[in-house]
Structures are given as C-alpha cells and as structure tokens.
Amino acid sequence: MRTRILPKMLNSEVQEYLKRNDIIIVPVGTVEMHGGLPLDVETNISEAVGLKMAEACDGLVLTGLQYFYAGATASGRGTVQVSVRQGIDYLGAIARSLLRLGFKRQIYISLHGPAHMTVSPMVRDFYDETGVPILYMDMTMQMFNNARDLFQTDKMASDPKEFMRLLDAMFVGAYQIMGRLEDVPLTTEFDIAVPQSCAQFNDLFNLAYQSGSIGYCFGENNDHTPTTAIPDEETRQRMADEGQELIEKLVERLNLPHVVEQMRKLEEYGLENEEKYPWMPSAWNKKDTKC
C-alpha cells in the first residue's frame, strides 16, 4: 500500500481497502507540557505505535486525534485541556462515523496515562448502542505486561532514571518512525530527576488508576517530566534507533493478528447473546419497536 495513514489516502484507496478488511487503529493523544520534548509527544508515540500495529494486521490508522483530556498538566501554558466528557462525546462521534464507513474492528490506543478516562467509557457505551465490540489497548499497561523483559522492569524499579531513559528513547524513536526526528530539540535543560512538587499527595493519587482518583494539577513545569539529556544529533539518533527497536518489539509481542481475529469472534459471540437476551441495550437499540 502507498500509505496506511487514512488522512493521507485517496478516497478510492480507502474504498479498495474496505473490500478486503475492516480494521482501523485510532491513536488518542494530547498536547501538553512534557519537559524537553514537543507538546505532542504522547500523540506522536501513539501514532507511531498505531502505524506499526496497522502494518502487523493489515489495518489503517486514523491520525490527528490530539486534543483530549490532558490531566494534571493543565498548569502548563502550552497544554490544551479538553474535558473528559467532551472527549468522550467527540470520540464517540468518530467511532460511529467509522462504523458507518465500514470499519467494524476499531482499536483505540494511547500512551497518555489518563486516556482511559475518555476511551474506556466510550468503548462501553458504543457497544450498548451498536452491539459492535471495539477495543481499547492501554499501551502503558502493555509495556509492563507483555513486554516486561524488554523494559527491564526490575532494573527500572530500582533506578528510575533508567526507566526515563528507555521511555525517552521510545518517544524519540516514535518521531523517527513518523518521519519527524528533527522535531525533537537538542536540550539538556530538563535532565534533572527531582521529586514532583505534588509527591506529598501520592497517598491520594494511588487510590485509583492514573489520574482518576482526585483533581489536581502540577505545581512545577518539570513535574511532567524530566527528560534525558539530548546534547547533540548523535545522541538523538542513538536514542531514536534504540526507541524504534523497542516499539517494534512491543508491537510484535501484542500479536495483532490474534487480537483482530479475537475481535471478529467476539462480535459473533455477542450476536448470539443478543438472540438469547433481547433486552440487552445493544439488541434493543437495533429494534424499531418499543415494549
């Protein structure tokens, strides 16, 4: 294929693709302060992973979804903050549009921690409305589940700076995958690992997953996040190569052909359940009559 990125395709190319398959990867990102990396870093890495996923399962990628709930980075002057509710509604509208076009197997992904607050409710509501199971894959969780050995989690637990180095390498590698390596600035300004100014409240933050426990914002720009020094182009290239390899290995571990086949089978299973339980929301929303 000339490209798998849907916005770059011709309409005729999309039509031709949909004759043989119905898979679309939808990376959900953000624009927010992020130390020494560009504001769209968590959008870009989600798109890079999404592209590799699409290559692995013969899917397409819908890029450009980057204005969603940022979370505690709202204190950053460059952060674009959108409410969780607005994000759910917007993403749901996109999901319904994609379904009308013929994309029944939709996979939403993100490496932005709080993205689950937006995507997971949309995924569940969408199923109740349509009966079509679409999927959310939290890439941060996958890093620590399917790829623990790749990210040396034992070492990272005892050496937080090693964790940040590997994560920053992935960020830089993602820019290389998307043909944007030059967008990563050469900087050493944020290579300072200090406790977050809000660390005194970690006992509250840890009571729920990610930013879902309580409302707060970061007090200092470097709270999100220290960035490994990138003093020259040679260092940037070395990080990019290491990070791209990590991304490619992570996607390989995800076994996308299996995932998309399971999605197909799950839809069949759901249709059988609708026949057995016609009062289910997904079954009822397909009916033209009321009780």
Image (cartoon, helix red, strand yellow):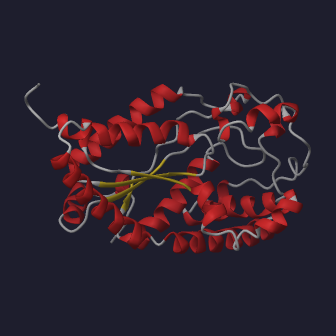
Question: Which quadrant of the figure has residue 284?
Answer: top left
In this picture, is 38 found above or below 221?
below
In this picture, is 113 found above or below 272?
above
Q: Residue furthest left?
A: 289
The residue closer to the viewer here, 282 or 52, is 282
Observer able to see residue 17: yes
The residue closer to the viewer here, 23 or 231, is 23
**Where residue 271 appears, x then y in whole percent?**
20, 52
Q: Is residue 168 left or right of residue 66?
A: right
The residue closer to the viewer here, 236 or 115, is 115
Of the 4 image quadrants, the one containing the C terminus is top left
Which residue is at 74% across, 58% downward? Answer: 168
**Where residue 27 appears, x then y in whole percent?**
48, 51
**Where residue 113 appears, x then y in whole percent?**
63, 45
Observer able to see residue 231: no
Q: Number of callouts in the render?
A: 0
Which residue is at 82% across, 59% downward? Answer: 230
Q: Is residue 231 left or right of residue 175?
A: right
Q: Is residue 52 left or right of residue 216?
A: left
Q: Is residue 159 left or right of residue 32?
A: right
**Where residue 199 appears, x then y in whole percent?**
86, 36
Of the 4 image quadrants, the one containing the N terminus is bottom left
Q: Residue furthest front?
A: 276
Which residue is at 51% across, 69% downward? Answer: 254
In this picture, is 109 found above or below 118?
below
